[in-house]
Image (spheres, coloured by chain):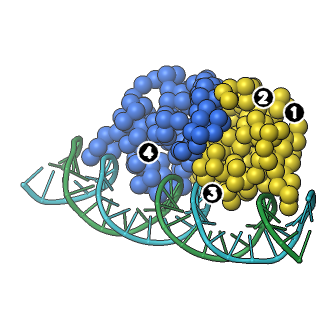
Chain colours: A yellow, B blue, C green, D cyan
Amino acid sequence: MQFSSRFTIATHILVCVCVFENEVKVTSNFLASSIQVNPVIVRNLLGLLSDAGLVEVKAGVGGTFLAKPAEDITLLDIFKAVEKEESLFHFHENPNPQCPVGKNIHAIMDKRIDDIQSAMESQMAQTTLAQLAEGVDK
Amino acid sequence: MQFSSRFTIATHILVCVCVFENEVKVTSNFLASSIQVNPVIVRNLLGLLSDAGLVEVKAGVGGTFLAKPAEDITLLDIFKAVEKEESLFHFHENPNPQCPVGKNIHAIMDKRIDDIQSAMESQMAQTTLAQLAEGVDK
DNA sequence: ATCATTGTAATCAAAAAGGTTACAACGATT
DNA sequence: AATCGTTGTAACCTTTTTGATTACAATGAT
């Protein structure tokens, strides 16, 4: 199991936008050639990032801009924008209610699983796009 | 993206073994009927848990036992036993080295990604099998 | 009106997940 | 040594997801 590359690609997109938005027109083709994936994949991800209020995409004329300051965009924002699953964990659906363990397994695990997901999300919230963009050596 | 149900099923297996190992013979069929999945799936997971040194499975005669005290088995041990991916995140393979962002994206993100995975794993290590088994109401 | 660009639908291939059948190997019991 | 329930594993199948690609209507500045 791994996260799809949507998260790392979306992050790559946002770093590019942050670094280049005032220098060149950041089109899906520009982004696609930096990431080396198909431009349609970029456009679909831009749609998700736009829905999440992270970027503004200029239809027709082209070009993408940050919709808010890079200091206010975290890895958690990006993750939530592109990974739509509510829960990280996939429970087996039908544990046997006749069995004491099957009957209680959800009650036993749900809180622990929430805590694990929260720990991950808290750490994601620690990194901002501004910090990432600082690491780009032009 | 979600983790496969291997993790929750494997945890269910271990809770069952912990609770029942001294009462009944814990076979793959017994476990399968508590979880309500195919016995072969249980046997495959038991193989992984056995490889990881968490359980001992009696071939031939049948039955599964914990290989160490329930206090010494954590959710992280279970997770690592059944999810073999080294990294949680899947990087796009070929960022463009001609682009300042493409060239640096790994250097920028690798540490952050490690921190996120570490945060998740640390939280997983906080819960022991013994704690989970306490929650079973027989 | 033109033209580069975006938004999106329609496909397609590859990989992964989950399930199932089948059967050889095992090992205690008789 | 034959039996019998069980484990270990191979083979196969379906469904879902991911990632990729082509195609084209809609957009909006010029």
Residue on which disc 2 sits:
A130
Q: Are marks 1 and 4 in contact (CB under 8 Å)?
A: no
Q: Give the number of the mark in front: 1 or 4.
A: 1
Q: Name the residue rendered at 76%, 52% in the picture.
A: A27
Q: Which residue occupies the foreground of this view, B49 or A59?
A: A59
State which tag comes first along the sequence, 3 or 1. Answer: 3
Label 4: which residue? B45
Nearer to me, A136 or B45: A136
Vertical order, A126 against B2 (above or below): above
Q: Are marks 3 and 4 in contact (CB under 8 Å)?
A: no
Q: Mark 2 belongs to which subunit? A: A
Q: CA distance from mark 1 to mark 4?
A: 47 Å
Where is residue B61, by image quadrant?
Answer: top left
The residue sitting at 57% across, 39% down in the picture is: B97
Coordinates of residue B67 in the picture (x, y in percent): 39, 29
For the residues beneath circles 1 and 4, the answer to whether they share a chain is: no
Element carrying mark 1: loop
Q: Is residue A50 visible to us here?
A: no
Percent position (x, y) of residue A75? Answer: 73, 34
Give me the C-alpha separation between circle 4 and circle 2.
Answer: 43 Å
Of all chains, the one bearing label 3 is: A
Whole-number angstrom distance, CA of label 3 to CA of label 1: 28 Å
Residue, disc 3: A38
Residue B108 image offset from top left, x and y in percent: 64, 29
Give yes or no for contact between labels 3 and 1 (Cβ–Cβ under 8 Å). no
Which residue is located at x 68 percent, y 59 percent? A40
Give the CA separation, mark 3 to mark 4.
38 Å
The disc labelled 3 sits on which kind of residue? Answer: Asn
Task: Give the CA distance from mark 3 to mark 2.
Answer: 26 Å
